[in-house]
Structure formats: C-alpha cells, structure tokens
Image (spheres, helix red, strand yellow):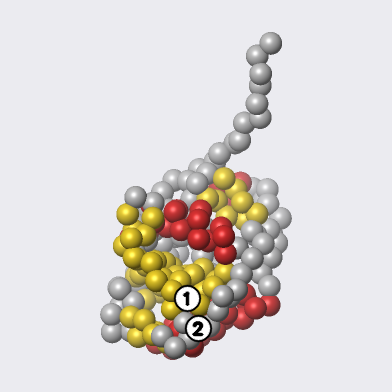
C-alpha cells in the first residue's frame, strides 16, 4: 500500500483575485496571500490600530503628493504574494494605483506594526520582503517599545539590522531629507 499524504493547495494572485471577485471569502475576513498560501490574520487590537493611525497622521503631515501613503492595502510581490502591510510609502502613481497594486519597485518604506504577530513579522514577512527587494522594512515593535529597522535586502534577509528607541531618529533611505522621530511613532 502506498502512503498518501494530504497536499497543500497553493494559489497564485490571479486565482486569489478570482476567488475574491466570486465572494468566496466573507467581507470581514482578514486574509493575506503569502507565498501561495492563504493566511488568516489576527484581528486588529486597540493598541495596534492606534499605532497605525499615529503612523498615518505622522507621515501624511510630513509628505507631499509625490508619495502615496497606503494603509493596510495590498502590495503585489511576484505571482504568489499579496500581503497587506500596515503602512507603505509608495512612489506616486499617475493613476493613483486604481489599475494595479504597488509592486516592490514602487515601495519606498514598508512598515508592520507588531504585537501578536512579532515572530511572523520577523521571520516569514521579513524573508518575503527581503526576497522581493523591499529596500527598507520597519517593525514597530509594540512589545519591546522599539523600532526595528531592516535595510539592504540580500538572499532573503537584510544585511543591515538596527533597533531604535524613543530617544532616536532616523532618515529614510528613499527620502533622506525626511527625518523621523521614533518617539512620534511609538
């Protein structure tokens, strides 16, 4: 007798979009497509939501129309992943991304606010973002009250990793004139 093992069904972005258009998922579902797998995400808690709002207000005040501030909206990474990061600063798009989601080449900064998902954000999401060349990835770490900064993606990891506290500030790689106070976002 031959052993038969359950097989995982992986999907791609085209099938993912067809499933969404067909109404397969309830509207209140919090799902992401990560490396071909449909993952159920945790509900957003009070502290997490508050920090996403704080980040949004902070960056909107600092930026002009040359940068699109996207909140918990999809980005397309290859044919198998469409995560919904908490905040993305993307290059401005003439159609304001009405005909496509931003790709890795459009991303200036990607931020995940993290409490219950810290381990996932430091491992699977970090690997995904680095593999696709996201040049600057931040984790607003609500557990340790710090900002984790990841830069220089290479081979599925980041070569430059640093941890900042409320006393620090940071310049964005893609927008060096923009200095961000860590206290303002923590």
Is 166 in front, or is 75? 166
Can residue 26 be seen by looking at this rendering?
yes
- Up the image or down, 127 lies above or below 111; here it is above
**Along the horizontal axis of the image, is 129 left or right of 116?**
left
- In the picture, the disc for residue 147 is 1
Estimate the spatial distance between the alpha carbons at disc 2 and disc 1, rounded to whole Å: 9 Å
Residues tagged 2 and 1 counted as in contact (Cβ below 8 A)? yes
Residue 57, image x, y percentages? 51, 85
Residue 139, image x, y percentages? 49, 70
Can residue 96 be seen by looking at this rendering?
no
Residue at position x 68%, y 73% in the image: 45
- Up the image or down, 138 lies above or below 177; here it is above
Residue at position x 57%, y 64% in the image: 118
Report helix, strand or loop for mark 2: helix
Question: On the image, numbered disc 2 is attached to which residue?
Answer: 185
Is 92 in front, or is 184? 184
């Amino acid at each position: 007798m031959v052993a038969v093992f359950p097989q995982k069904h992986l999907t791609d972005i085209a099938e993912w979009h067809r499933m969404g258009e067909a109404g397969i998922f309830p509207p209140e579902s919090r799902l992401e497509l990560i490396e071909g797998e449909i993952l159920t995400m945790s509900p957003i808690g009070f502290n997490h939501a508050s920090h996403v709002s704080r980040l949004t207000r902070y960056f909107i005040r600092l930026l002009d129309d040359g940068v699109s501030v996207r909140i918990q909206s999809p980005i397309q990474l290859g044919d198998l992943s469409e995560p919904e990061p908490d905040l993305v600063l993307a290059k401005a798009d003439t159609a304001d991304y009405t005909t496509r989601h931003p790709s890795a080449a459009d991303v200036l900064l990607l931020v995940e606010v993290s409490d219950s998902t810290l381990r996932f954000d430091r491992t699977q999401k970090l690997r995904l973002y680095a593999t696709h060349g996201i040049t600057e990835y931040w984790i607003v770490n609500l557990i340790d009250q710090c900002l984790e900064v990841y830069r220089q993606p290479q081979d599925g990891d980041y070569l430059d990793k640093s941890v900042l506290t409320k006393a620090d500030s940071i310049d964005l790689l893609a927008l060096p004139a923009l200095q961000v106070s860590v206290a303002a976002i923590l």
